[in-house]
Amino acid sequence: MEPRIWLIAGPTASGKSALALRLAETLGGEIVNADSMQLYAGLRVLTAGPSPEDTARAPHHLFGMVDPAEGWSVGRWLRAATEVLADISTRGRHAIVVGGTGLYFRALTRGLAEVPDVPAEARRAAGADFERLGETGFRERLAAHDPAAAARIAPGDRQRLVRAWEVWAATGTPLTDWQRTGDPAIPEGSWTAAALEPPRAALYARCDARLDAMVAAGAVDEVAALVARDLAPDLPAMKAVGVREFAAHLRGEATLAEAVSRAQQETRRYAKRQMTWMRGQMAGWPRITAEDTGAQWRQFIALEPVLTPT
């Protein structure tokens, strides 16, 4: 089989990482991260990054390699991923891109234009406007100029809301329009895609169980180390699901049980947003709807007859 690029998307706790790892072992391929939180170092447990045992089974790229003090954009990930994919291709190996960040997959398959630099004064003004108007008023103002951005940006995501407004204010063109331009990083015909969408009740149960397992594996210690760095709260790593909830526990504002319950609730909400994105932006991707990993693999190879069951 000629080496190609395989794209596996899915909400958190859906089983996509296990599917990607099995595919990598079957094909002798390499795994490339497409999860915006798994980029950051020091949060392997909290973000369900690959374990040492996983990385021993297949090469992994772009996992845990960014300092949390940095804030990577979609464009920066795209440049890094494109370089990694080119390197894997030159070695004649399959690449398996796996993750739950829909914007990463859209940038990879549809392109992402380079937004012109926004002047510092425009950035400062946008931040000040957010503080003055509050999230609701700021979002309503953004909706008048970039309704798609206002609709897709999750509640509480100050960074992306401010970014969308500052781009409009500085360029007169909505960020959504900038993101619609540009050439795909990987051409049509070079990749095969699938999206995991297990039953919602089963997915939510897996989200809850995984949070309990994360706590047992040291997720609270990871958050303690991150909080001790006193980083800016609007950095992407500080918004990883569980950071806010466990930080509150560490400050004595919540019991561990309360923090776990709140983190579980936020994880379920995050999974719901991911599924909503996939249904809107990945409507044409084949679906893997099974719950357990064995059944997911069987569905996957049924979609891809070039694969031989193992």
Image (tube, rainbow, N blue to C red):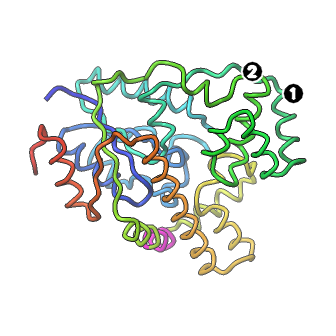
Left or right of residue 207: residue 21: left
Mark positioned earlier in the residue sequence (2 or 1): 1
Q: Nearer the viewer, residue 254 or 16?
A: 16
- Quadrant location of the N terminus in the rendered image: top left
Q: Position of residue 239 (x, y in %)?
A: 64, 53
Left or right of residue 190: residue 301: left
Occupied quadrant, residue 3 = top left
Dominant secondary structure, magenta: helix
Amino acid, disc 1: Glu
Q: Nearer the viewer, residue 175 or 44?
A: 175
Q: Residues within 10 Å of mark 2 (few under 14, many from 20)?
A: some
Q: Position of residue 246 (x, y in %)?
A: 64, 68
Occupied quadrant, residue 94 = top left
- Residue drawn 68% across the image and 73% down it: 249
- Residue drawn 43% across the image and 23% down it: 185
Question: Nearer the viewer's eye, disc 2 or disc 1?
Answer: 2
Q: Position of residue 23 (x, y in %)?
A: 23, 45
Residue placed under numbered mark 1 in the picture = 121
Secondary structure under tag 1 reads helix
Image height of 256 relative to 238, above or below: below
Amino acid, disc 2: Thr
Q: Position of residue 173 (x, y in %)?
A: 70, 23
- Residue drawn 87% across the image and 34% down it: 125
Q: Nearer the viewer, residue 124 or 52?
A: 124
Left or right of residue 70: residue 267: left
Q: Nearer the viewer, residue 281 or 71?
A: 281
* Magenta range: 209-217
- Residue drawn 34% across the image and 39% down it: 284
> Residue 184: within the magenta?
no
Q: CA distance from mark 2 to mark 1?
A: 13 Å
Secondary structure under tag 2 reads helix
Residue placed under numbered mark 2 in the picture = 171
